[in-house]
Amino acid sequence: MEVCYQLPVLPLDRPVPKHVLSRRGAISFSSSSSLFGAPDPRQLSQRRGAISYDSSDQTALYIRMLGDVRVRSQVGFEPERRSSHPYLCIDFRTLHTRLSCGSSPADSGTEKRVHRLLSFQRYLHSSRLLRGIPQQIPLHILDEDYSGQARCMLEKVGSWNFDIFLFDKLTNGNSLITLTLHLLNQYGLVDLFQLDMVKLWRFLVLVQEDYHNDNPYHNSVHAADVTQAMYCYLQEPMLSKSLTSYDILLGLLAAATHDLDHPGVNQPFLIKTDHYLATLYRNTSVLENHHWKSAVGLLRETGLFSHLPPEDSMNMERELGSLILATDISRQNDYLSRFRTHLDQESLCLSNASHRHFVLQMALKCADICNPCRPWELSKQWSEKVTEEFFEQGDIEKKHKLQVSPLCDRETNTVGNIQIGFMTYVAEPLFGEWARFSDTRLSQTMLGHMGLNKASWGGLQPEQTAISEETETSARGSRSKGIPQGSRKS
């Protein structure tokens, strides 16, 4: 029986109320106020970043290239070392701040107390509010044509060709809210777990708000894309006939929040700049721990599961963290080796709760890096976005005289060679084992797309190499004429 739900009367394009913008955030960190000092916006007018890849496994050369783990042994944990560290001015909360050059942060104790508690994305909004600076956010009203097209797309939400970019436009940038709410309703989870619709709506709004949409890649559209991919995997026969409603709820929530409040820079960057988050989580799964704790903060703030027994709520938070932490690519080979052993020994028993949870972890890992498996038109867009985050991180590393991270130098790398390496060393091994576990049409489709996309990038390599060489030559010429490197716009 199909169950319909009346949503709160909140249009998708409605601006976030002021009491939401100034509310306390996902997690409170104990830290000296100097760590939150905003650098001069004229020095950091644009945010930089890349995704977090990092591993110590000797067989994972490409993963090590994506995030050099050697910085872990080079940077200590002592907070007092920060006072002499030259990179304190690099704070990812302000890397993408677009304030006027004449504006300066307020000195009031109120702002200091507020921004200590807010998540980093909402801090940017609240700080503008406290200084009386109006937000330059245009308001667009969706007409019936757009909302109707979005509803039509949701009828095919299980299609692997689902165009999340188009869906995001049709929902006026609210793809994550709309998609997640639709899937929870489709599974009947709102009724089954007696979720309050107002609390659920507020939770999803805050989740979407806490993604940094200035990030080229790690933004709410990526979260919506991962959630849609996760739904496709949940529909696979091996999972659909075994997973419980509790498993499905966890899987969808983990997909929607797996990169919550992502700063757009990777873990090695946070470690080598001695960022307090790296110290807080002892240089281990820094970003993933932060995503998890941010998600837990929103769950508690909105009281979404406050009606459940405390033990059940705590278990849900803990298992949500287990899923999100599995997306740390530095642990890729550990999970892959365990998955391969299960498949070799045919020891996976999906009537076992721990085995079902492990399969959910593998499904979320696949959903998180499924971009190479999408059709070329979608995969190419994602490849360009994620590579731009790499390059932007390289730009800011150059600007601050830091060693440029592997694959982050736009003058020596191309989208094609980065993607070919990623497919070869990361995606193909993972999706090959997933196809062994779930040998379905979807699995074969994903492997087929990845093969074609890899060949397409290979065909574009000579052209991209020529463009890269021309760019490098031009840059050299500019430097010889005395033009500062930092003057180039991204």
Image (tube, rainbow, N blue to C red):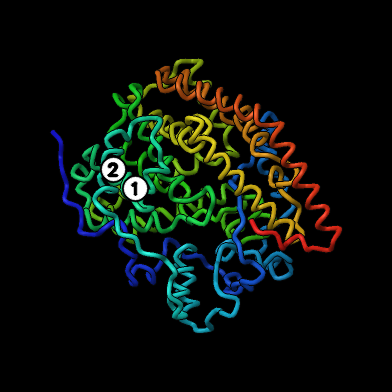
Say which of 179 and 74 sits in front: 179
Furthest residue to the right? 480
Q: Which residue is mark 1?
A: 170
Q: Are marks 2 and 1 in contact (CB under 8 Å)?
A: yes
Q: Which mark is residue 352?
A: none
Task: Count the marks.
Answer: 2
Say which of 88 and 386 sits in front: 386
**Relative to 109, is 160 on the left or the right?**
left
Q: x and y percent of residue 54 in the render?
A: 64, 42
Q: Quadrant of the N terminus?
A: top left
Q: Quadrant of the C terminus?
A: bottom right
Q: x and y percent of residue 50 in the render?
A: 60, 49
Question: SS of the residue at dot 2?
Answer: helix
Quarter-of-image position of residue 397: bottom right
Furthest residue to the left? 1
Q: Which mark is residue 149?
A: 2
Would you place residue 422 above or below residue 19 in this image? Answer: above
Pointer 2 or 1: first along the chain: 2
